[in-house]
Image (spheres, rainbow, N blue to C red):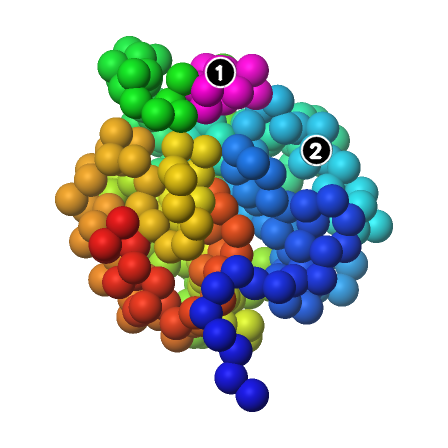
Amino acid sequence: MTRSAGPVRARRAAGELLEVAPGVFCVRTPLANWYLLRAGRDLTLVDAGYPGQAGLLLSSIARLGHEPRDVRAVLVTHAHVDHVGGLPDLLRAAPGLPVLLDPVEVAHARRERVEQVGTATVLRHAWRPRVAAWAVRAVRCGGTAHVRVRRAAAFPAPSRGGALDVPGGPVPVPTPGHTSGHSAFLLPEHGIVLTGDALVTGHPLSAERGPQLLEGFFHHDPAGTVASLDVLAALPADVVAPGHGEPWRGPLDRAVARARRS
Ligand SMILES: [Zn+2]
């Protein structure tokens, strides 16, 4: 039986907690997603939502029957506030938890450098459909908060096959452009790639569903974002698990071709 391209019909555990594959959970919210990878009693968290979603982040761990101390590592696709916002609360609940990023992204997470779209840029685009409504929701969710992750560190050396020695065995895939040190994560066992903001399937600014790029003004280096699509297209995966939008089933090269047309 062949599976057609489209949204993953995942088992809906509760609310917006989707089991994309055994042990791979997507917490989908209208503003941003994060992921939990489970191996036995241990978890890896990938991304952490907005600051205003910290309670939801902690409750998503509890909904899986876990406690913050079960999280062995946090991986971050990139250090935008909607991907690291819940970390201060989680780190208070789980002191010592490592927060790992691409080496280039570490300074961004520590806010020694900022590559985040600013209020002035958003205001310049506020006349366009959906931008003002999204901005209000994002600000209410802590989108202008200054979240500094002092504990941010570079990925340790990977084991054979490039996998990190953390639950779920994700393989970092450098995909610079959206930010200088953006990283996707391939889950080879499942044919899933967590694409962060390098490739999404929806966003409050978009009227479309399906593989697409975010609005250009969100990207630190728009040309780099487009170039990184070639990296994603070559991955042996058939599920896009994005930072925004719903998980999407279909070969990566076709998802990328669709995003190029968006
Ligand atoms: Zn981003």
Q: Amino acid at mark 1?
A: Val
Vertical relation: 203 (above or below) 227: above
Would residue 93 appear left or right of 137 to someone viewing this image? right
> Label 2, on which residue?
56
Q: Amino acid at mark 2?
A: Leu
Q: Which residue is rendered at x = 71% and y = 28% of the image? A: 55
* Mark 2 secondary-structure assignment: helix
> Label 1, on which residue?
136
The picture places residue 148, in percent across and down from the top left corner, at 48, 22
* Mark 1 secondary-structure assignment: helix
The picture places residue 130, in percent across and down from the top left corner, at 40, 25
Q: Nearer the viewer, residue 201 or 171?
A: 201
Disc on the earlier residue, 1 or 2 = 2
Would residue 131 appear left or right of 192 to someone viewing this image? left
Vertical relation: 240 (above or below) 30: below
Query: What type of secondary structure mainly makes up the magenta span?
Result: helix
Would residue 23 appear left or right of 110 to someone viewing this image? right
Q: Residue furthest left?
A: 223
Q: Of the residues tagged 1 and 2, which is closer to the observer? A: 1
Question: What segment carries the magenta color?
Answer: 133-144
**Label ID, residue 66:** none
Q: Mark 2 and ligand 1: say if the CB distance to the nearest ligand atom is below 8 Å.
A: no
Q: Nearer the viewer, residue 198 or 44?
A: 198
Is residue 75 visible to us here? no
Instruction: Calculate the distance from the C-alpha at mark 1 to the C-alpha at mark 2.
Output: 19 Å
The picture places residue 163, in percent across and down from the top left corner, at 48, 66
Is residue 80 visible to us here? yes
